C-alpha cells in the first residue's frame, strides 16, 4: 500500500489536471506524491506483466530499485538529468555536432576510410562531397593505417571547423565544413546488383523530414517513383523499430485495405482503476505504394515496430519477406513524463499481426530464407522473378573487403507517447 490512500485516489486526477492546466488546478490541500510513489502507482496500473507486480516494494525509496525488481528489459526509468536527451534520441534522428556522413572501411588499404552515405541537407551534402570518396586527410592529418578511423573521430570530436581532402575519380578535392546539428535521413535508396533497395533504418517522428519523419521521407520517395515498374526491395534488415504511428502509417502506404495491426494494453481509467483497451488500425486506400511491386528484406536485427511493418505488408498484400527470422519483440512501451521530470518507459502493450498472430519471442519467419550475402540472395530472387539475370558492374559497397561503419545506435522498439493512448 502507498503511504496514503488519498494519494492513490488523487493520482489520476493530478494527471487529468496536468492535461488541462489552463482551466483547473489542484486544491492546495491535495498531497503531492513523491517521485517513488508516482512511479509505483504507474507501474501497478500499466505494466503488462501483472504477475511480477507483487515484486514491487511499496515502501522503498529508490525509483531505480523499483524498476530493477521487474524482469522486462525494456521497462526502465530515466532520471530527470537524462530524460531530455533520451526523449530526443527516441523521437528524432538528430546527430549533434556532425558533418552529416556515414562511412566504410577498406581493409589493408593505405587510406582505409570511404564516404558511404552523405546527408543531402548536412554540411557534407551542401558542400558536394561524393559517395564512395576516399578520405585522405582531416585538418591536415593523414588518415592511414589501422588507427585511421579512430584518428578521424578524435579530430571531429574536438573541431568545429573540418577540412577534408577526398580522392575520387582520379581527382583530389579539399572541402571545408562547419559542424552542426544534423537531422539524419532514415530512408535511403540504392541500386545494388541492378535492383533498387529502399532501406528504412528506423521509424522516427522527426528526421530529415522534420514535419513527418520517416513516413514523410518514404512518401516523398514513393510519390516520385509511382511509374516505377521493377520490383523493389524494402530493406528493414537492421531496423530496430521506433514509433508505432510511423511504422503503421508506413505500412499503410503499401496496403489498400484491411487491419494493419492490433494492439492491446493495460492502462487506467479517469478514476484511477485499471483498464484494458484494444485498438485496431485500418488501412486507407489511395497511397503511392499500393500499385508497386515489392519484396521485404528482414533479419534478426528487424525488431518491434519494424516487425509491425513487415507483418502488416506481407499478410495484407502479395509481398513476400526474404532474409532471416526477425527478432521477435511483439510488445511495446509507453513513455510517461514523471512528476520530477524523469521519464518512465513502461512495457504495457502487446501487438498482433493482421491475422491475429502473436510474434513475441518467436519472430516473423520469412517466406524465403537467405543464407550468406543477403543482398545477393534478394537481388537474385528479384531478377529470377523478372527474368533479368544479367550481371551488372559492382559498386564499392558490394565488394567484400569493405565494412560499413554503423551509425550510432538509436533507441528502437515500439514506442507510444502518453497522448497516443487513445
Image (cartoon, helix red, strand yellow):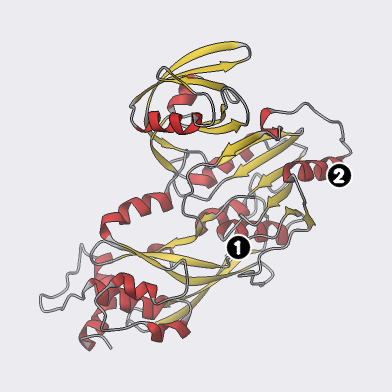
In the rendered structure, which disc, 1 or 2, sits on the residue that comes first in sequence? 1
How many residues crowd mark 1 within 10 Å: few (<14), some (14–19), many (20+)? some
Which residue occupies the extreme top position in the image? Answer: 171
Q: Residue at x 76, y 34 (%)?
A: 193
The label on residue 257 is none
85 shown above or below 375: below
Q: Image check: 228 left or right of 344?
A: right
Residue 268 visible in the current orientation: no
Q: Residue 129: x, y in percent?
A: 52, 21
Residue at disc 2, secondary structure:
helix
In-front residue for pair 69/275: 69
Q: Residue 378: x, y in percent?
A: 77, 45
Residue highlighted by disc 2: 385
Whole-number angstrom distance, CA of label 1 to CA of label 2: 31 Å
44 shown above or below 202: below
Which residue occupies the extreme right position in the image? Answer: 387
In-front residue for pair 219/299: 299
Q: Image check: 335 left or right of 3?
A: right
216 shown above or below 46: above
Residue at disc 1, secondary structure:
strand
Quarter of the image where the C terminus is located: bottom left
In-front residue for pair 252/175: 175
Quarter of the image where the N terminus is located: bottom left
Residue 116 visible in the current orientation: yes
Q: Residue 282: x, y in percent?
A: 60, 63
Q: Residue at x 77, y 26 (%)?
A: 393
The label on residue 282 is 1
Q: Residue 156: x, y in percent?
A: 39, 30
Q: Nearer the viewer, mark 1 or mark 2?
A: 2
Amino acid at each position: 500500500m502507498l503511504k496514503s490512500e488519498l494519494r492513490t485516489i488523487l493520482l489520476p486526477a493530478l494527471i487529468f489536471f496536468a492535461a488541462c492546466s489552463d482551466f483547473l488546478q489542484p486544491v492546495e490541500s491535495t498531497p503531492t506524491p513523491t517521485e517513488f510513489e508516482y512511479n509505483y502507482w504507474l507501474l501497478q496500473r500499466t505494466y503488462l506483466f501483472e504477475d511480477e507486480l507483487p515484486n514491487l516494494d511499496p515502501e522503498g525509496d529508490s525509483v531505480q530499485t523499483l524498476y530493477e525488481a521487474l524482469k522486462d528489459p525494456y521497462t526502465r526509468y530515466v532520471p530527470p538529468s537524462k530524460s531530455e536527451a533520451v526523449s530526443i534520441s527516441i523521437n528524432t534522428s538528430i546527430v549533434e555536432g556532425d558533418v552529416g556522413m556515414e562511412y566504410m572501411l577498406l581493409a589493408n588499404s593505405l587510406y582505409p576510410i570511404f564516404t558511404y552515405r552523405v546527408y543531402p541537407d548536412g554540411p557534407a551534402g551542401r558542400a558536394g562531397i561524393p559517395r564512395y570518396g576516399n578520405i585522405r586527410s582531416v585538418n591536415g592529418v593523414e588518415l592511414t593505417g589501422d588507427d585511421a578511423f579512430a584518428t578521424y573521430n578524435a579530430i571531429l570530436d574536438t573541431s568545429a571547423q573540418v577540412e577534408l581532402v577526398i580522392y575520387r575519380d582520379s581527382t583530389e578535392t579539399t572541402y571545408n565544413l562547419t559542424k552542426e546539428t544534423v537531422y539524419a535521413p532514415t530512408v535511403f535508396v540504392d541500386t545494388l546488383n541492378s535492383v533498387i533497395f529502399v532501406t528504412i533504418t528506423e521509424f522516427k517522428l522527426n528526421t530529415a523530414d522534420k514535419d513527418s519523419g520517416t513516413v514523410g521521407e518514404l512518401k516523398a520517395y514513393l510519390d516520385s517513383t509511382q511509374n516505377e515498374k521493377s520490383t523493389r526491395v524494402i530493406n528493414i534488415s537492421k531496423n530496430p523499430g521506433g514509433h508505432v504511428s510511423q511504422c503503421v502509417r508506413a505500412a499503410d502506404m503499401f496496403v489498400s485495405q484491411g487491419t494493419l495491426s492490433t494492439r492491446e494494453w493495460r492502462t487506467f481509467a479517469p478514476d484511477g482503476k485499471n483498464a484494458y483497451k484494444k485498438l485496431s488500425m485500418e488501412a486507407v486506400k489511395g497511397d503511392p505504394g499500393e500499385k508497386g511491386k515489392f519484396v521485404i528484406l528482414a533479419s534478426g536485427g528487424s525488431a518491434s515496430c519494424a516487425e509491425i511493418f513487415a507483418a502488416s505488408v506481407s499478410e495484407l498484400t502479395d509481398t513476400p519477406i526474404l532474409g532471416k527470422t526477425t527478432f521477435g519483440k511483439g510488445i511495446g512501451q509507453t513513455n510517461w513524463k514523471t512528476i520530477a521530470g524523469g521519464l518512465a518507459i513502461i512495457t504495457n502493450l502487446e501487438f498482433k499481426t493482421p491475422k491475429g498472430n502473436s510474434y513475441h519471442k518467436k519472430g516473423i519467419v520469412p517466406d524465403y530464407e537467405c543464407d550468406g550475402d543477403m543482398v545477393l540472395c534478394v537481388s537474385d530472387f528479384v531478377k529470377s522473378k523478372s527474368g533479368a539475370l544479367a550481371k551488372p558492374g559492382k559498386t564499392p559497397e558490394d565488394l567484400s573487403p569493405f565494412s560499413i561503419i554503423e551509425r550510432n545506435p538509436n533507441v528502437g522498439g515500439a514506442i507510444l507517447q502518453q497522448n497516443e493512448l487513445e
